[in-house]
Amino acid sequence: MAIDQPSHQEVVEATEATEAVMRPQTVPVNVHKAPEALVVVAPLPAVAAEDVTVELRPGKLRFWAALRSSGPREYLVHEWEYGGYEREIDVPDGYGSGIEASLAKGQLAIRVLRGEPSDLRTIKPTGN
C-alpha cells in the first residue's frame, strides 16, 4: 500500500497557510542565576539554530523560532507545530551586558551576562 507524499509546493503552501493564522506557541522556561550570567533554558523541538532569533534589550529577553514546516496532514491529535515558538521574560537588574545562546538536541540555552544592560542586541544561537 503506497502512501501519497505531498509535493514540496504543497508543503510550502500548507506552511504559509498555517503561519498566517497560528498564534505563537508559548514556550516554558527554566531560569537560574549562575556566577556570571542569568541562564535561560527552553525546549524548542523540531527547529534548527538558523530558525531561532534571540533578542536582548534592557530589562527584557525575547526569543522566537519561525514555523519550519506544516505539511498537509490529517491529524488524529494536533497539539503543536514545528516552530512558531515565542517567549519574552523579564531580566532582573544587574544583567544584560551581553548575550550568548546555543541550540542542541531541541534545547535552547541562553546566557544573559552580568553587568549593565546595553542597547538592543539580536543574535542567532550556535547549533550542534
Image (cartoon, rainbow, N blue to C red):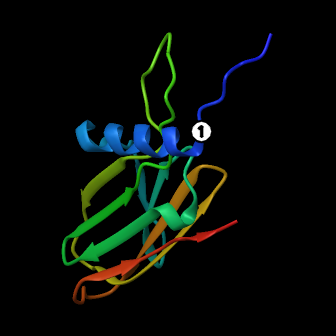
Coordinates of residue 121 in the picture (x, y in percent): 31, 83
The correct choice, above or below, for 4 with respect to 116 in the image is above
Task: Using the image, determine if residue 11 lies above or below residue 118.
Answer: above
Specify the quadrant that holds the N terminus.
top right
Check disc 1 and report its element: helix, strand or loop.
loop
Q: Is residue 97 left or right of residue 42?
A: left
Residue 111: give x, y in percent of width and height: 46, 71
Measured along the vertical axis of the image, is residue 107 above or below residue 119? above
Identify the residue at horizontal 32%, vertical 87% (top origin).
115
Residue at 24%, 83% in the rendered image: 120
71 or 89: nearer the viewer: 71
Q: 39 or 104: which is nearer to us? A: 104
Within 10 Å of disc 1 (Cα), the crowding (few <14, some 14-19, many 20+) is few
Type of residue at label 1? Answer: Ser
- In terms of image quadrants, where is residue 53? bottom left
Q: Would you name the residue on which mark 1 appears?
A: 7
Establish if 99 lies above or below 28. Answer: below
Q: Quadrant of the C terminus?
A: bottom right
Compare residues 74 and 90 and report the one nearer the observer.
Answer: 74
- The picture quadrant where one finds residue 33 is bottom left
Residue lying farthest to the right in this orientation = 1
Residue 73 coordinates in the image, percent (x, y):
51, 23
Q: Is residue 45 left or right of residue 63?
A: right
Q: Residue drawn 21% across and 74% down?
A: 93
Q: In this rendering, would 104 be left or right of 81?
A: right
